[in-house]
Image (spheres, rainbow, N blue to C red):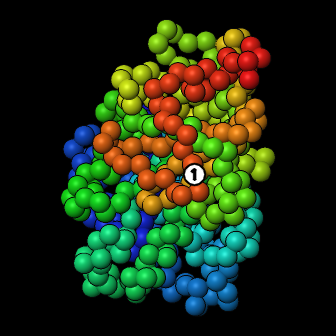
Amino acid sequence: MELTKVVITGGPCAGKTTAMNWIQNHFSRMGYKVLFIPETATELISGGVAPWTCGTNLDYQKCQVKLQLVKEELFEQAARTMKADKILIVCDRGFMDNKAYMTEEEFAAAVESVNGNVVDLRDNYDAVFHLVTAAKGAEEFYTLENNAARYETIEEAVALDDRLIAAWTGHPHFRIIDNSVNFEKKLQTLLNEMLSVVGEEQPIEIERKYLIEYPDIKWLEENPFARRIEIIQTYLNAKDGEEYRVRQRGEDGHYIFSETVKKRISGLKRIELERRLSENEYRKQLEYNRDPSCEQIRKTRYCLAYDKQYFEIDVYPFWKDKAIVEIELSSEEQEVRFPPELHVIKEVTDDPEYKNAALAKHVHQGDI
């Protein structure tokens, strides 16, 4: 059984409801069993449990996060009993959406109430797709009329959209679907991204990589749209023309583990196949399959959401004057818009010397 769990999130009037119908129709026709986990807040509030009926907002949020996790666990449990080869679980909002409605202190208390940690709760989903509110770039289509529960002004909708993006920043497969095209093309972009995640189409990654001046760490640490992630990357013995590695990724002592195989097709395009590993599987790969010609690469990654884009800034311990920034694109023609705080030295997308695998060899040989 192939089971994939994704989150569809977004600001008010982003097209989430219509997107769910598109997903149902498209993936059902492709032979998927599609399961939808309803938005938890809607269920609770319609039943009379709300921030304004509970003692405090935190009292309400503790109920909400607990129900969220129980629902997801039950849906996964049920899915594994079904006679289906391919199952897609679509969450109408995920755990981190709740953070947009809480203070940092309240969110920490809510996480503690379910005996969890941010890494496991955020990265438990295979991918997260954020549909940008119509209030950003498609204001003429922003309306309160098609949702009785919607009350936000355009300004409030923009602020909430920003908080949701900030909440999910740090997830390894976070995609922001903006309003730069018409609504139908917006939904088609979402479907294309989802097809790549489930592996129905050849999972081609279009990525640009830039060498930048050493970034302002204080700015990144204080930026609400940036998240600090610690990564240890180890290269394994691979076939010619392929790159094979395992990764430990997380923060505050909590980690997830993954295995990735990459093969370049052309300049910006490459095939990338990734799967989650248990810690035991990860340790076995390190013990039995490690490439002896490469040193482990340890880096601090800052995931940064800026202007409807998602950057990954890698800071290495052996460089004090430069760093690497990467961005995944939906097309080779897509414009990259850098925040003014990042100063690009040059593009290194096609320069093999700046690949992590090459850096791992240079570190091993003592060249860096």
Write the residue at 41% across / 40% down. Answer: 197
x then y, percent, for residue 81: 46, 42
Identify the secondary structure beneath mark 1. Answer: loop
Name, please, the residue furthest toward the front. Answer: 345
Tell me if residue 134 comes above or below residue 28 in the rendering.
below
Name, please, the residue furthest toward the top. Answer: 240
x then y, percent, for residue 27: 28, 46
Quarter of the figure that contains the C terminus? top right
Disc 1 marks which residue?
Answer: 342
- Please state if 111 lies on the left or on the right of 137 as rendered: right
* Residue 185 location, quadrant: bottom left
Write the residue at 27% across / 39% down. Answer: 31
Q: Is residue 256 visible?
A: no
* Residue 181 location, quadrant: bottom left
- The one nearer the camera, 301 or 210, is 210
Q: Is residue 267 visible?
A: yes
x then y, percent, for residue 143: 29, 82
Quarter of the figure that contains the N terminus? top left
Q: Amino acid at mark 1?
A: Leu
Write the residue at 76% across / 36% down. Answer: 317
- The one nearer the camera, 3 or 324, is 324
